[in-house]
Image (cartoon, rainbow, N blue to C red):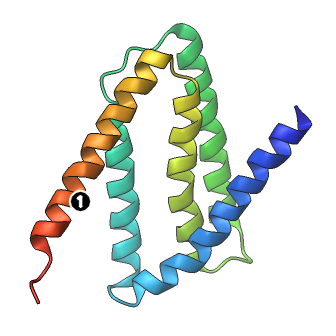
Amino acid sequence: MKKNRVARLSAVAAQLMILMTAPGLTRSQSPVGQSVQTSAENQQDLYAAAFAGLTYTDAQKEAIDKIRQDIASRKETVMKADKLTQSQKDAMLTGYTPIEYELIYKELTPAQRKLVSTRMHARRTAEQGTQTTQAPSR
C-alpha cells in the first residue's frame, strides 16, 4: 500500500516538474496570462465533455466529491505559496486538471471507463484531423 502511494506521488511530482518547465516554452509565443488561462479552460472543458452524461452511484459521487475537495485544497495551497512565481503557479494549477480526472476515472465502472475512453479517443482523432488540415503546405 505504501509503495503504491509513494509511486503515485512520485509520478504526480514528476508531472508537475515537467509542467513547471514546459509553460515557459509555449508562453514566449503568446501573451502570458491569456494563454495559460485559455489552455486550462480548454483542458477542463475537454475532460468535462468526456465525462458528461455519466450516471454515478452514491459511492462514486462521494468519492468524486472527496477528490474534487482534495484538488481544490491543493490549488488553494498553490495560490497561497509565496515562493512560487506566477508562471509556476499557473503550471501547477493546469497540471491538477488531468490528475483530478485520472483519479475520477479510477472510480468509474468498467463500462463507464470504456465510454470515457471512447470519447477521449474520438476527441484526439478529431484534433489530429483538424491539425493536419490546418497545417500550412510547404
Residue 94 x %, y %: 50, 61
**Image position of 31 (left or right of 125):** right
Residue at (59, 18) in percent of width and height: 62
- Which residue is tagged 1? 128
Q: Residue furthest front?
A: 138
Residue type indicated by callout 1: Gln
Could you tell me which secondary element the residue under label 1 belongs to? helix
The answer to whether 45 is drawn above or below residue 2 in the figure is below
Give whichever of 114, 89 is nearer the camera: 114
Q: Quadrant of residue 31?
A: bottom left
Which quarter of the rendering shows the C terminus?
Answer: bottom left
Q: Residue furthest top?
A: 58
Give whichever of 72, 27 is nearer the camera: 27
**Image position of 1 (left or right of 23):** right
Quick check: can you spot residue 78?
yes
Residue 114 x %, y %: 40, 25
Residue 87 x %, y %: 54, 78
Residue 44 x %, y %: 39, 49
Q: How many marks?
A: 1
Residue at (32, 42) in percent of width and height: 121
Quick check: can you spot residue 49?
no
